[in-house]
Amino acid sequence: MVAWLLRILVVLGLLGSAWVHWTLWSGEGFRDIPTIGPLFLVNVAAGVIVAVAVLFWHHWLPVLAAIGFGAATLGAYLISLTPGGLFGVREQFVTAAEKWGVITESACIVFGVLLLVAQRVRRKQSVLV
């Protein structure tokens, strides 16, 4: 039950991040930014693909991919907050999209790690029975 709840939270984090990036790309002008625009579309596709994998393939690999997705996306955002920005784009952590992005990407990391632990505990318990 706990693993299922964690799996859903990871999927929601992935889809939430994909939605934030889709919204920014499609309606906030990010599609016109060189390098960043295409990377936002890659983020959208990767978020959806990894979410489907986490939901239907109950293995540690897609969960690890979700953690990596969250860490890479959050890391890129944190770089964009620096004076040099990321590929010339500098963010300021003021918009709702930025805040939701940080929340969803952090969820991928935190709940993904917890899901890996839950899966490991469950696997050990099934071996002992």
Image (spheres, rainbow, N blue to C red):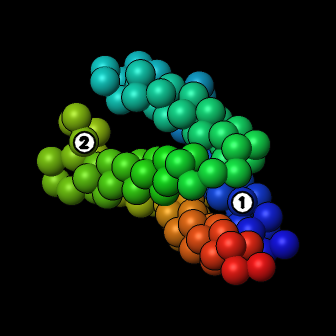
Q: Is residue 85 left or right of residue 104?
A: left
Q: Is residue 5 left or right of residue 15?
A: right
Q: Which of these two is toward me, 30 or 75?
A: 75
Which numbered dot is residue 7?
1
Q: CA distance from mark 2 to mark 1?
A: 31 Å
Outermost residue to the left: 84
* Residue kind at label 1, given as amino acid type: Arg
* Residue kind at label 2, given as amino acid type: Leu
Q: Position of residue 94 (x, y in %)?
A: 46, 60
Q: Is residue 96 visible?
A: no
Residue sitting at 57 percent across and 46 percent down? Answer: 62
Residue sitting at 54 percent across and 33 percent down? Answer: 46
Q: Which of these two is toward me, 89 or 107?
A: 107
From the viewer's perspective, is residue 23 above or below residue 106?
Answer: above
Within the image, what quadrant is residue 47 found in? top right
**Pointers 2 and 1 in contact (C-beta within 8 Å):** no
From the viewer's perspective, is residue 69 above or below residue 10?
Answer: above
Of the image marks 2 and 1, the number of the one nearer the N terminus: 1
Query: Which quadrant is home to the N terminus?
Result: bottom right
Q: Position of residue 51 (x, y in %)?
A: 66, 43
**Label 2, residues with CA under 10 Å away: few <14, some 14-19, many ≥20:** some
Residue at image mark 2? 86
Helix, strand or loop at mark 2: loop
